[in-house]
Amino acid sequence: MVKFSENDLAKVQEIVAHYPDGKQKSALLPVLHLAQDTFGGWLSSETMDYVASLLQIEPIEVYEVATFYSMYHLKPVGKYVFEVCQTGPCMLRGCDDIIQYITQTLGIRAGETTADGLFTLKTVECLGACGYAPMMQLGKYYREHLTKEKVDAIIAECRKTAAELN
Amino acid sequence: MGMKLLLEKAHVEGIRHFEAYRREGGYRSVEKALKEMSPEAIVEEVKKSGLRGRGGAGFPAGMKWSFIAKPEGVPRHLVCNADESEPGTFKDRYLMEFLPHLLLEGLIVSSYALGSHATYIYIRGEYAWIATILETAIAEAKANGMLGNNILGSGFDCEIYVHRGAGAYICGEETALIESLEGKRGNPRIKPPFPAIQGVWMRPTVVNNVETLAAVVPIINMGGEEYAKIGVGKSTGTKLISACGNINKPGVYEIDMTISVEEFIYSDEYCGGIANGKRLKACIPGGSSVPILPANLLLKTAKGETRYMNYESLSDGGFASGSMMGSGGFIVLDEDQCIVKNTYTLARFYRHESCGQCSPCREGTGWMEKILWRLENGEGKETDIDLLWDIQRRIEGNTICPLGDAAAWPVAAAIRHFRDEFEWHVREPQEAKRRNYGLAHYADPIHVPVAG
């Protein structure tokens, strides 16, 4: 069942307190981030309904927001999501080669997840790292100045972390 | 070395934290403002400084502040726009990452000037680690009496909250940002009413860019008149430029707006020239939505005068032969780059980011992307070029917010200045596909045509 821990519920309360009384809907984006991080890296209908109940708003108000913003995943994703920027400035610095290399190395195309559930490849639009291109977002952080060697190292690092967690 | 008002201390060790920032003279403007100045006097200083909005539009900040309504008993809010998403732009990120307290200092002074007791930083969701840096800085400022109740004994109360977006370029548009802050889809509102009258939660609201609010600090410290002496004409103060693309030294640079474009690209102090010994072909000087210029029109205006890195000079010649300062996202293309492909990626970006409210933008951005894909991939027709031109004209000016214009301008400018490269893609599809770059002759020194 989808339910926040006491600790996370306290975080929700703290977020809601940032906004005026009765405007708890304003907390929706931050609470959805928290929910996605907590419940498996994506937002199921169950998760969205739960967030709606917490913020005392209608489920539709959550769905329409979750479907609008590109950071919310509405389908399960791999443990590590490679979000590679493909907009102009990154293109000028060779992001196409990086995307192709990841595709070859992991055997997945953009939008797909590896069979072992470890990696998802996504192509995304400008992440504001144009001077450090090509780049990708991995979890909370950016990986910049990508080369094929760096991609190899990142994949190895993810595999190692995953193995250690198991 | 150019004058630095914002980034001077960026490399001081520990400057990200309160102690080092304060030791280096930080928060002096808060002391000065809250102890010696009235809110009205601060607005007056900002007006005198000539500071223009650094997000892209360049609207005078002091004037924007003076529009805020002050109905009895209704709270007002300052919202900092940190939804930096315009391709080519990464300056606010740099400022927040390295000098979070500079932004907070500007926010406290500005909140006092506007009467905002709850101020929000709306930061793009992907900058997750920067949100944490800001939250740490806020806690430090609060622990040291710069935030909270009765700041420095002045009787002024203020809290600053960080609000993360979730991936939507459109939320950089101020009314979309306000909708998003209210927990809704980022659909821009029809203006009027302007945010200064009815903004977030229908309360009077001012939305300013990160760099704009940080610039309030030197303005208060040195006085508006002194600040206005830096720069040239209506381009006062310093501007952060984020330079990227095919240059030797991509990065964020603070410039006073008197240097030439040529110096900015070729001097070692800034971009350090074109990478790999290539030649300059074209440049988008102010973020992806402003018109792209071929090398000859970039370095000199159509009148043959030197072009400078400021609002007036970059827009000299209008859209026929000029561009815009925009957000300061400076994208350089070398001789190997294909204008059609570059334009295609930008069109794809705007299609992806259109909120879908207005038909010209929702449909038009998709059509432009498809046609550009066709041209880039050797399946274009001669008539496609005129069709693209026609579509962009029907988007521009026909939408609620400026995203429509932002999507139309890059396509228009690419066709205006590089039409033969589009035609070459139609005529020689296999060659265009194989070489994957366009005609390089734009990098040759060519005679500069006189407009008109």
Image (cartoon, rainbow, N blue to C red):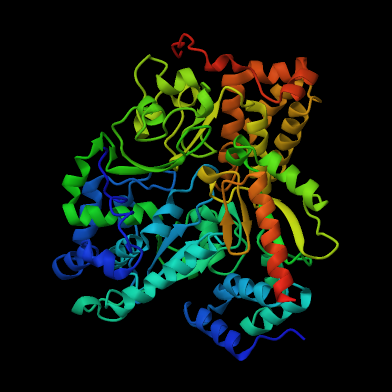
Q: Quadrant of the image for the N terminus of chain A?
A: bottom right
In the displayed structure, does residue B310 sit left or right of residue B47? Answer: right
Q: Quadrant of residue A68?
A: bottom right
Q: Quadrant of residue B38?
A: bottom left
* Residue sitting at x 17%, y 52%: B222
Is there any visible trace of residue B74 in the rendered image? no
Spot occupied by residue B43 in the image (x, y as percentages of width and height): 24, 57
Spot occupied by residue A106 in the image (x, y as percentages of width and height): 79, 53
Spot occupied by residue B204 in the image (x, y as percentages of width and height): 40, 65
* Residue sitting at x 76%, y 18%: B431
In the displayed structure, does residue B366 sit left or right of residue B13? Answer: right
Q: Is residue B23 above or below residue B264?
A: below
Is residue B323 or residue A124 the one in the foreground? A124
* Residue sitting at x 34%, y 65%: B104
* Residue sitting at x 52%, y 42%: B88
Spot occupied by residue B401 in the image (x, y as percentages of width and height): 55, 48
Q: Quadrant of the image for the C terminus of chain A?
A: bottom right
* Extreme residue toward the right, this view: A115
In the displayed structure, does residue B422 sit left or right of residue B227? Answer: right
Q: Quadrant of residue A55?
A: bottom right
